[in-house]
Image: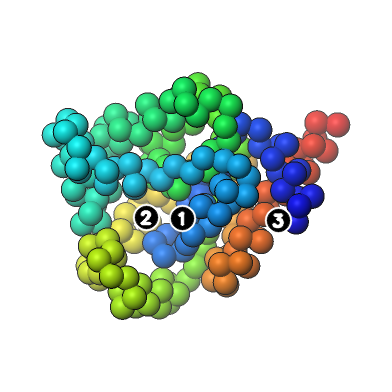
Amino acid sequence: MDDKIIAIKNWLGSGTINIFGIQFSGKDTLAVPLAKKLGAVFISSGDLIRAAANSEHDQRLRQAAIDSQTGILTPTDEFRALIVPHLKDERLTGKPLVLGSVGRWIGEEEPVMEALNEGGHPTKAVIVLHIPDEEIWRRWEIVKHTRNGGRADDQDRQHVQRRLDEFQEKTLPVIDKYTELGLVIDIDATGTIENTFNLAIDGLYRRAIGSTNDAT
C-alpha cells in the first residue's frame, strides 16, 4: 500500500481528484481518508454552500444555501460565484486537492476545471462511485434511524428522491464529459468502506503507473 501511495502522490503533484457518486454512495466517506492519506486538502461544495446560509453574503447565495438543505442543488450562477473563487485561493497553492462532487451540474465542470488549472491544480482523475438502487434505499433507512440531527434532506424520502433525480438529470452528463476526457475511474462502492478505499487506491495507482509508462 505504501508504494502505491508514493506513486500516486508523485503522479498527482498539486493536481486534483474529484469524487462523484449518487447519494449514499459514500463520497465524503472515501474523500476524507483519501485526502489525509495523500496529504491533500479536502473540499466539499455542499459544505461551502450550506455554510453560506449562516453568512452575511449576497442574499441569492444565502437562498441557494438554504435550498440545498431541502435537496435542491444550488443554481449554476450561484455555484460559480461561491465555489470557483475558492478553487483559486492562494492558500491552496502547491497543494493537491480531493473534491467532493464539486461541479455536479452539467455546465459547471468547465469553470471548475478552468479554475483548478489557473490555481495550479489540474484535474488528474474523477472517481465515480456506483451502488445499485436497492443499496441506496437500504443505506437511507440506516441513516434515517441512526443520524441524530443530520441533514434535513437525509430524513425525508421526497427530498432524497429529488436529489436522486437531480443526479440522473444533471450530474450524469457531467460524468459523461469527464469520461470523454479519459479522467473517470469507476468504483463499485457496494462493499465495505475499507474495500471501497482500496479499490480507489488501486484505480489511482493504475492511472499513476499508466501515466509514467506513457511518459517513457
Q: Can residue 55 be seen from the camera position used here?
A: yes
Among all residues in the image, which is located at the extreme right?
A: 216
Q: Residue at horizontal 35%, vertical 34%? A: 83
For the residues carrying marks 3 and 1, which lies nearer the camera in this image?
1
Question: Can you say which quadrant of the picture contains the C terminus?
Answer: top right
Q: Residue at horizontal 53%, vertical 25%? A: 93
- Which residue is under mark 2? 167
First of labels 3, 1 by sequence position: 1
Q: Where residue 79 appears, x then y in whole percent?
A: 30, 36
Q: Where residue 91 appears, x then y in whole percent?
A: 47, 26
C-alpha span from label 1 to label 2: 16 Å
Amino acid type for the residue under numbered disc 3: Asp
Above or below for 141 versus 149:
below
Is 117 left or right of 72, judged from the image as shown?
right
Amino acid type for the residue under numbered disc 2: Phe
C-alpha span from label 2 to label 3: 26 Å
Seen from the viewer's position, the closer of residues 80 and 12 is 12
Q: Can residue 180 be seen from the camera position used here?
A: no
Instruction: Look at the numbered disc 1 and give the secondary structure of its residue.
Output: helix
Amino acid type for the residue under numbered disc 1: Asp
Place residue 140 in its image quadrant: bottom left
Q: Where residue 108 appears, x then y in whole percent?
A: 38, 36
Q: Residue at horizontal 79%, vertical 50%? A: 3
Which label is found at residue 28?
Answer: 1
Instruction: Look at the numbered disc 2 and give the secondary structure of its residue.
Output: helix
- Which residue is under mark 3? 202
Which label is found at residue 115?
Answer: none
C-alpha span from label 3 to label 1: 18 Å
Instruction: Look at the numbered disc 3 and give the secondary structure of its residue.
Output: helix
